[in-house]
Image (tube, helix red, strand yellow):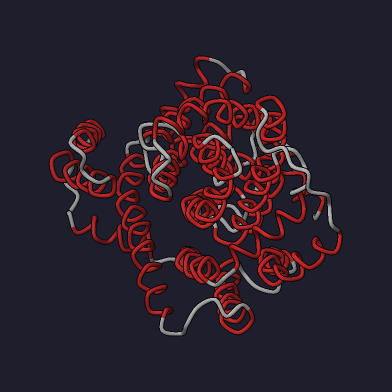
Amino acid sequence: MIEILLVVMVFALLINVPIAVSLGFGGLMALHFGSNVSLVLVAQRMFTAVDSTTLLAIPLFIFAGKILSEGGISKRLVNAAHASVGWLPGSLGMVSVLACMFFAALTGSGPATVAAIGSIMLPAMIEDGYPVGFSAALICSASIMGVILPPSIPYVNYATIAGVSIGDQFMAGVVPGLMIGLFLMFFCYFAAKRRGFGQTTQKFDFKEFIIAFKNAFWGLLMPLIILGGIYGGIFTPTEAAAVACVYGLIVGYFIYRGFKLRQLINFSYESAKTTGMIFFIVAAASIFSWILATEQVPAMIASAVLGLTDNTILILLLINILLLLSGTFMEMTASTFIYTPILMPIIHQLGIHPVHFGVIMVLNMAIGFITPPTGIHIFVACGLDKRVTFNGVLREVFPMFVVLIVLLMLVTYIEPLSMGLIRLLG
């Protein structure tokens, strides 16, 4: 049965059938030709996969992020970032990274971060003398914080499959997410010094700093409300997503006055489209995962891998390579639902905490946002400014890719970077 599943799925992917349809159709053919199971099971499994209170957090976080991204917060976040680091060499580049960090903590989406921050910062960086490719590559790389910093939709998916706390998974992403921002800011600083762009004569203005953060205060407060509420036992992650929606409506409409009430219809429509895409993949992937479990494929793979070597360092390196390659070609939601049940037995036998591994998995696949042939962040950036070309971004993104790989290795092999904050908070 597993052979039929893989052949049909791979063939469908090769002829550019959407990933969700490939997964679902492959599962359907495998059950029809390789077993005596009634095909009614397919509909039942797909419905059961999305009939989850936990997964309800996904459309709510998407809607909250849409409200905040359209509600006038982007410009305020950029101003706050500029007041913080605008006096350093490479300041506009560092402002872009810091603004991506702030925005990522609100939306949980990488492409949305590219679009929101890139539309403001790309023209500003290019006009200030930054190379076009460098400007776009930096924003594309920094925007992967959208799925590393909480709230993160991939974390919700992973935690649901792996059976771990969503709150713990959110908290585990805080330090690695902040490290991405710091690493890229240091990179921008030294690149500006070496290549001679982004040299500023502006001085730090404490008054401007206070005013900028005062204006952005209500937007920056939301991540603290979400994490504080979850860890304080005030509400569950799903309830936190609902709170984020209400909070976003209050801040966006009454405080920032960034949208009209009639625009909520469009926000709801866009959120529903994104949710439908994600849930279709989740439903289709559940058939794939069920067949793998029925055929005991994860256990066989775990046995085979552990039979080759019991060296944790080497096995984690191999897993990282696998996930990096998958992130290059495959959509993140599908990769999460395919690889989590396969790799979890290996992770448990190696004694690796599943929350720690969740950060490793999501970070690997997030790096795929800036690598060809998919490179969704690069395509979004190309659509923001006609001066940005795919090849131009690729030439500049490679050193940033190396920086992110170094960070990935640190997160992989130094567990306290992801688990330390959780243990500190008990």
Task: Pick whichever, 421 or 325, lies toward us.
Answer: 325
Q: Position of residue 259 (x, y in %)?
A: 50, 78
Q: How far from the left and from the top, in percent, is residue 384?
A: 42, 50
Q: Residue at x 42, y 27 (%)?
A: 301
Q: Nearer the viewer, residue 240 or 49?
A: 240
Which corner quadrant holds the N terminus?
A: top left
In the image, residue 21 above or below residue 309: below
Residue at the extreme right of the image, as rendered:
206
Residue in view at x 40 percent, y 30 percent? 391
Given residues 40 and 50, the one toward you in this image is: 50
- Residue drawn at x 55%, y 47% is 143
Side of 373 relative to 353 (left or right)? left
Task: Give the position of the C terminus as an image quadrant.
Answer: bottom right
Residue 342, percent across and down? 44, 36
Number of marks in the image?
0
Q: Position of residue 304 (x, y in %)?
A: 45, 21
| Residue 181 in which image quadrant | top right
Above or below, 2 relative to 274: above
User: Is 35 drawn above or below residue 321 in the view shown?
Assistant: below
The furthest residue to the top: 308
* Vertical order, 376 against 106 (above or below): above
